[in-house]
Image: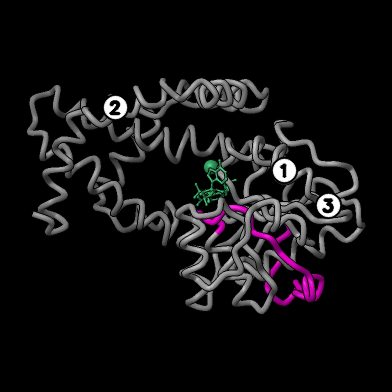
Amino acid sequence: MAEIIGDREASLEPLKGKTIAVIGYGSQGRAQALNLRDSGLNVVVGVRPGGPSWKRAVEDGMKTLSIPEAVKIADVVMVLLPDMVQPKVWREQIEPNLRDGVTLDFAHGFTIHYGLIKPPSSVDVVMVAPKGPGQLVREEYLAGRGVPALVAVYQDASGSAWDTVLALAKGIGATRAGVIKTTFREETETDLIGEQTVLVGGLMELIRKGFETLVELGYQPEVAYFEVLNEAKLIMDLIWRYGITGMLERVSVTARYGGLTVGPQVIDERVKENMRRAAERVRSGEFAREWVKEYEGGMQRLSKLMDEMRRHSIEEVGARLRKIIFHEA
Ligand code: NAD
Ligand code: MG
């Protein structure tokens, strides 16, 4: 059983009187910086002077510094930059300015797990990975709740890294929803495998292939769109709220019988074999190497794939129908 830690089991004490530098003020950076500040902690933001994130941080009343300046005064350095940007900023602006005995915190384990960043052995390396987008991390905090998170310690130089990471998780509001202890490896691999096979890759392809199947059989694209894309959200909401059986209990008995008998024939063992292959590429580091190469080469394959998706007929039908559904016409 996973160890789940709640709000009362974590204390902010280890961070009192400490300076927390949030590096990057994007989706996670802004949300985490504001939550930590509202939890009564001392937060500074490190961003590129004059850039859009700098302006946003100043507008939010944050003490805003360049990245090297923020790192120089920090006891805790939160690296909340895009994963592919982290290695270069680490080499040029973070590592040369680190104080002794600091804590380095990440929101995803990618760069540490795959060795793109190699911190000195004298620092603590920890992670609070919220299991939700930054905007929600902020909204839930303001509503008195939190987004659950995974927490991990990669390197415990001080002997008190777990106290620090739990304090950070509490300051962000994550312990209100519960945090689960994990490792950098487990967080990184499950995150990548999950987004590739189920969340981003799996759902998208399931919907696209379902749409193509209906349209190729001669049905109207608008009808196909409502059936396999629009309604997917309504079914997902039921699964999210009530679980799979709860969803099955709330659809028609015909849908329940058809789904239970035909579902495993469509998403069959071959799909699971494909998922295992994708998982293997993540676990071996092959996917990470490919992605770093693609990023460094200018991401031409990514732009091409995005263009192809943009031009797919489900997107054309969808853009038209969403104007009606969301009264944007
Ligand atoms: P983001 O793209 O929203 O924000 C990144 C910040 O970095 C911005 O302030 C941007 O201005 C700055 N930045 C970009 N390039 C830079 C450069 N070359 N030099 C200096 N600053 C630069 O990033 P994010 O989505 O918040 O991701 C941050 C971390 O959080 C990543 O490790 C990511 O995996 C993790 N994470 C994100 C989410 C999410 O909801 N987006 C969820 C969980 C974990
Ligand atoms: Mg992810």
Tell me, yes or no, if residue 1 can be seen here.
no
- SS for dot 2: helix
Foreground residue among 199 and 308: 308
Q: Is residue 271 left or right of residue 168?
A: left
Identify the residue position indicated by label 2 in the image: 307
* Residue drawn at (62%, 67%) of the image: 172
- On whether residue 27 falls in the magenta region, the answer is yes
User: Does the numbered disc 1 mark a residue whose Cβ is under 8 Å from ligand 1?
Assistant: no
> CA separation, marks 2 and 1?
33 Å
Which of the two marks, 1 or 3, is nearer to us in this view? 3
Q: Which residues are magenta?
A: 1-29
- SS for dot 3: strand
Q: Residues within 10 Å of mark 2 (few under 14, many from 20)?
A: few
Q: Is residue 316 left or right of residue 262?
A: left
Q: Are marks 3 and 2 in contact (CB under 8 Å)?
A: no
> CA separation, marks 1 and 3?
13 Å
Q: Quadrant of residue 187?
A: top right
Does residue 105 lie above or below 137 as drawn?
Answer: above
* Residue drawn at (58%, 54%) of the image: 47
Numbered label attached to residue 184: 1
Foreground residue among 266 and 160: 160
**Quadrant placement of the C terminus:** bottom left
Q: Position of residue 92 (x, y in %)?
A: 70, 39
Q: Quadrant of residue 49?
A: bottom right
> CA separation, marks 3 and 2?
42 Å
Identify the residue position indicated by label 3 in the image: 124
Tell me, yes or no, if residue 318 can be seen here.
yes
